[in-house]
Image (cartoon, rainbow, N blue to C red):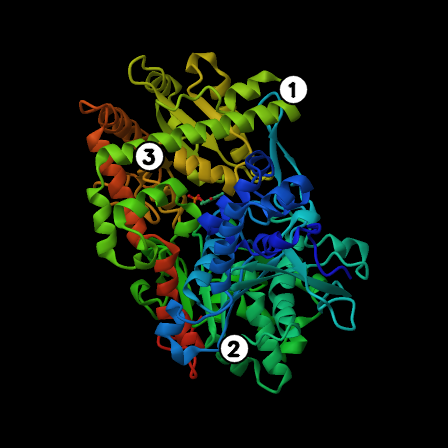
Amino acid sequence: MNPTHHTIGPLPEPLSGLRDIALDLAWTWMRDARRLFRSLDPTLWAETRENPVRLLKELPSGRLQECAEDPEFLALLESVRGQMAVLASDDGTWFSVNHPELAGRTVAYFCAEFAVHHSVPIYAGGLGVLAGDHLKCASDLGVPLVAVGLLYRHGYFDQRFDDDGRQVSEDEVFDPSVLPLTRLEAGAGPGLASVRLEGRTVHLSAWEMRVGRTRVFLIDTNLQENAEQDRELTARLYEDGEELRLKQEWILGVGGVRVLRAVGIEPTGWHANEGHAAFMMLERARELVERGSSLDEAVREVRSRSVFTTHTPVAAGHDDFHLDQIQSILDPVWEELGVDAAGFMRLGKAPGDDDDVFHMTAAAIRMSSRINGVSAQHGEVSRRIWQGLWPDKAPDDVPIGHVTNGVHRWTWMASRIQCMLDEELGAGWEARVQDPALWDRVLSIPDERVWQVHLGLKRHSAGFLREQARVRWRDQWTDAKHFAAAGPLLDPEVLTLGFARRFTSYKRADLLLRDEERLRRLLTDPHRPVQLIYAGKAHPADDEGQRILERIHQLAWDPRNEGRVAFVEDYDMHLARALFQGVDVWLNLPRAPMEASGTSGMKAALNMVPQLGTHDGWWAEGFDGENGWIIPIAADLDDPDEEDWEHVFRILEDQVVPLYHDRNGNGVPVGWARRMKRALWVAGRDFTADRMLRDYVASYYAPALSPEGIPEDGGAPTA
Ligand SMILES: *Cc1c(COP(=O)(O)O)cnc(C)c1O
């Protein structure tokens, strides 16, 4: 078996260290490492979409030789190697200093998707990015975490549009030879572990992805020894079809535990990030039953080591499976648990559901002692949704807490802003980010400075969009109108609003389109025009999302909108970074209270871009009156769209546009710059993954890792 995926060829001796750097995704958040790769060949770096494995593969050997003799390059390489070497040890990390008593213990973190870098396209959206940021920050803080996921060889999907503006989905381009993954060697058997599905044995192999101190194991069923149809089980993420979902989740949960055992990792604490991973708890219970426990005892034991995070109040975000499906796909699993089918189904029974439905979130809640939502408001909503599991408790007493999401600062904050902070906050500020007083100093950065940095970023992003459109026009588009819609017409000097996320109906990408005339007046004002830039994929099975995409294309193509609307194709982390850095206002318009947290507004804010958002998710606690604008809760919660729409327009027309154009003698919008700094101040201090991880450690991981496990303080579900 080929032990590695990537095919980086031989490098000149002095540059041999580049290989290890390229194969550890920690490079993605190291400014010097990014600079190092870019300096090898800035054009190829952009063309490979910042994929160092591809860069090293494709770089002409002459250029490599040149760098091998360039003292400046070698000095930078040495410095990056030094920064990487620090990650080989846990000495002196925040975790090792604060929790020496937990040394040597590990948390296993299971998730259906991970977004660490766009070159490993095994994610669809917010959940994956959040999970990726969690891993990166675990590395930064030295939190002992290993992660388990699936390797989707065809990714999610690539987004294209036909000449009528209809979304066409294609398999994501996925070249295994340019992935920073290492295949784990199996022992004697065909894979590392196996599961049973439909009466067949499915062998599992695994790939390791390095994210600094954090190891990620990605399971893959594409093994010769597997039946043809089973080799495709892990091919695509969130493919339609409940049976496939059940199989994938079985592979993730049950297979994931077995793979960890096979590679000799013995976690103490276990974290299921969203209900997709709930079978991980079942497998641990099965292991205990096999060793002689009753199922009740096993569940009690599993609970004391398990943490579960729920990520959405939207019903479609929670999987459930019918007894018939379970019976036909899984061997009679209940026999191995020492119960009958009814006893098994009770573990996954959700309040109000029939007895023959196994609900993954309900199961995860029953098998975890610590459960959380992802913002204060989502915690409250979740307590109400799941109160039926504790019929004797008032909603406020339901033991579901919250940890508000945060984003990985070093991934999402533009290098230019980090450079500005080097000067404004003093060298070494990166080591003091946990000190709130550090962030206070952001507020006194000169307005002129803030504004110039922002304009530089806007121009840079506009250039990026133009180049991306040019390449797509060259390679793919048959009609020039796609080019017109893709951003080249945007003017970096004009007030620009950004909206990018999954196109699912509750996120309301079409809210501004309720009255196209009013929108047009806003966009085409001759003196104070506004630009609108959209990006996002709709799930191929989501018809309403597709219709919205089509409408936005019509809007962008309509000459009456004067090129002030753009839709940028194929939203991913790479494009997201350009958008967070390159717009003036971030729009976030979910129908409250459907957005559990939302994180894109935090990333925008780390780039000094204030958010205009509904009173929902993180914004309900993150808005402080001056770091953006908030749409108040609608009086009619059953039909809030009209009210919210009126509010957005009034805020845009009466506040956003005038403030943006209120300039001092040097052309600096002073009031606006203040809001930008305020956005950075709040997000940098309170909405980073660093704060999030420390919250998880304090209330979730430390108890789960302690010798006695998590105390049953909240009480297990009684229904
Ligand atoms: C942050 C992010 C998301 C999630 O954005 P929300 O505001 O939570 O909807 C989705 N996709 C990408 C690429 C992101 O970077």
Question: Image quadrant for the N terminus?
Answer: bottom right
Amino acid type for the residue under numbered disc 3: Val
Q: Front-most of 608 and 76?
A: 76
Mark 3: secondary structure: helix
The answer to which image quadrant residue 526 occupies is: top left
Q: Which residue is mark 1?
A: 478
Residue 271 spot, x, y in % from top left: 49, 67
Query: From the Cβ of disc 3, is ligand 1 less than 8 Å away?
Result: no
Mark 1: secondary structure: loop
* Crowdedness near tag 1: few (<14), some (14–19) or many (≥20) residues, C-alpha within 10 Å: few
Mark 2: secondary structure: helix
Residue 410 seen by the camera:
yes
CA–CA distance in space, label 3 to label 1: 37 Å
CA–CA distance in space, label 2 to label 1: 58 Å
Query: From the Cβ of disc 1, is ligand 1 less than 8 Å away?
Result: no
Q: Which residue is mark 2?
A: 299
Residue at the (31%, 46%) spot, across then down? 421
Residue at the (41%, 20%) spot, across then down? 564
Q: First in sequence: mark 3 or mark 1?
A: 3
Q: Front-most of 666 and 402?
A: 666
Count of marks, rendered view:
3
Q: Front-most of 105 and 17?
A: 17
Apparent side of residue 304 relative to residue 229 in the rendered image (left or right): left
Amino acid type for the residue under numbered disc 1: Thr
The image's mark for residue 453 is 3
* Crowdedness near tag 3: few (<14), some (14–19) or many (≥20) residues, C-alpha within 10 Å: some
The image's mark for residue 19 is none
Q: Front-most of 359 and 293?
A: 293
